[in-house]
Amino acid sequence: MVQNVQNYLVMPAKCVTCPFRTDEHGRHPNPQLTSKLMQQVICEASQICHHPRQAGKPETHLCRGARDYQLTIFHRLGVIPAPTDAAWQETIKKFNSTNFIKQDIL
């Protein structure tokens, strides 16, 4: 099922159950799951935070761990100028701007 998450806020911090968290040795709790999610959040879509669902609450936010990973990769690729939420939002505004699209495509 595809959801429009365009207006979802990003969690302020990683949840205690976040698959993107690491232990004191830098290891993910479930490396196979984390690897799969890393590929998805770069190639397909942002990740909805699953933590509220475990408590029977609605899923209304995006995963902080996934967003931090996206910020790192998109910054390294030069898509965003800094690995920050502010840079992400500025770039989204720029891509949504008609002037930007006309300028860079034509």
Image (tube, rainbow, N blue to C red):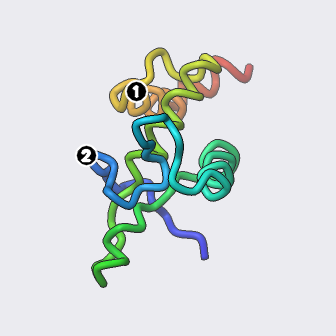
Three-letter residue code for mark 2:
Pro
> Could you tell whether 80 is left or right of 35 in the image?
left
Q: Which is more toward the observer, 16 or 78?
A: 16
38 shown above or below 68 = below
Residue 56 - label:
none
Chain-order first, disc 1 or disc 2 = 2
Three-letter residue code for mark 1:
Glu
Number of the front mark, 1 or 2: 2
Residue 12 - label:
2
Cα separation, mark 1 vs mark 2, equals 19 Å
78 shown above or below 56 = above
Seen at 33% across and 27% down, the residue is 86
Q: Residues within 10 Å of mark 1 (few under 14, many from 20)?
A: few
Q: Quadrant of the C terminus?
A: top right
Q: Residues within 10 Å of mark 2 (few under 14, many from 20)?
A: few
SS at mark 2 in the image: loop
Seen at 47% across and 35% down, the residue is 25
Q: Where is residue 23 shown, x and y percent of the image?
A: 42, 42
23 shown above or below 72 = below
Seen at 52% across and 69% down, the residue is 3
Location of mark 1 (residue): 90
> Could you tell whether 14 is left or right of 98 in the image?
left
Pointers 1 and 2 in contact (C-beta within 8 Å): no
Seen at 40% across and 37% down, the residue is 24
Q: Where is residue 45 shown, x and y percent of the image?
A: 59, 53
SS at mark 1 in the image: helix
Which residue is at the far bottom? 56
Q: Where is residue 35 shown, x and y percent of the image?
A: 66, 49
Q: Is residue 72 visible?
A: yes
